[in-house]
Amino acid sequence: MGNLSESFDIEDLMSYGDDLISLLNAKNGFEVVSQSFEDLKALRFVCDEDFNQTQRSIQDCKKKLVACKKKTEEASCGDDDVERLQRELDEEMEIELVARELKDLNAQWTSVDEQRQSVKRKERDDLRAEKMLSMYASVTKVIPEVEDPSKISGYMVDREKKVIEKFQFETNKMTAYETCNSIWSIINKQ
């Protein structure tokens, strides 16, 4: 078997040799081999440069890592100091949280107070408007309806006769002067 493998290797070797001879016999075969050899040398040079650059970068990183470890060891403090600092930090955070909540509550209180004052003003204005409407009704015996702005309507009230008479004027069919005169004529009829 060893003899068979040797013959196989010799056959491959002979084949490679024949290919090399045919390449060298070709017109520009030697130039192709020479150019390939030069390209190989250039490629190897570039690879060596890249390898060296990578090695230098690795060395720099190792140096920086050692320096960082050294600084970390110098900066680290005892467990008691860390616990004390952690407690102080927790206390400060709790104080800030309480201050923030207090600020929010103050803002809510101000908002509620403003709303309360606004409701009181509205109630006061509504009461004033109701009293004014009652005064107008007592003097003119007219109770206006203000729900529909496209018409002027209301009720004429005569307490002595216990009569309620409805009136209504379309504002788009009469001028303001005519509407006013019509209302005064109804009032004067009473």
Image: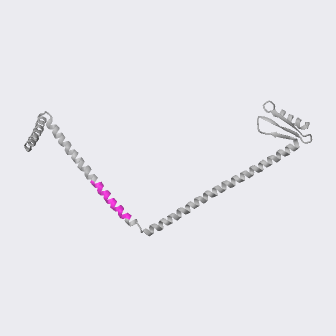
Q: Which residues are magenta?
A: 55-72
Q: Position of residue 87 (x, y in %)?
A: 49, 66
Q: On the rendered image, what quadrant is the C terminus found in? A: top right
**Which image quarter holds the N terminus?**
top left
Q: Does 168 appear in magenta?
A: no
Q: Reply yes or no: does residue 58 show up in magenta.
A: yes
Query: Quadrant location of residue 104?
Result: bottom right
Between 9 and 81, which is closer to the camera in this rendering?
9
Residue 71: x and y in percent read 37, 64
Residue at 69% across, 53% down: 114
Left or right: where does residue 22 sit relative to residue 80?
left
Prevalent SS, magenta region: helix
In the displayed structure image, the side of residue 102 where residue 185 appears, left or right: right
Task: Looking at this view, name the residue that lies furthest to the front.
Answer: 1
Q: Quadrant of residue 12?
A: top left
Q: Which residue shows up at 61% across the image and 58% down it?
A: 103
Give whichever of 185, 165 is nearer the camera: 165
Q: Position of residue 140 (x, y in %)?
A: 87, 41
Q: Residue 177: horizontal and vertical position, in percent?
A: 83, 34
Left-right relation of 174 to 189: left
> What residue do we see at 47% from left, 66% from top?
85
Q: Is residue 170 left or right of residue 46?
A: right
Residue 18 vertical position relative to residue 73 in the rendered view, above or below = above
Residue extending furthest toward the right:
160
Residue 110, located in which quarter of the rendered image?
A: bottom right
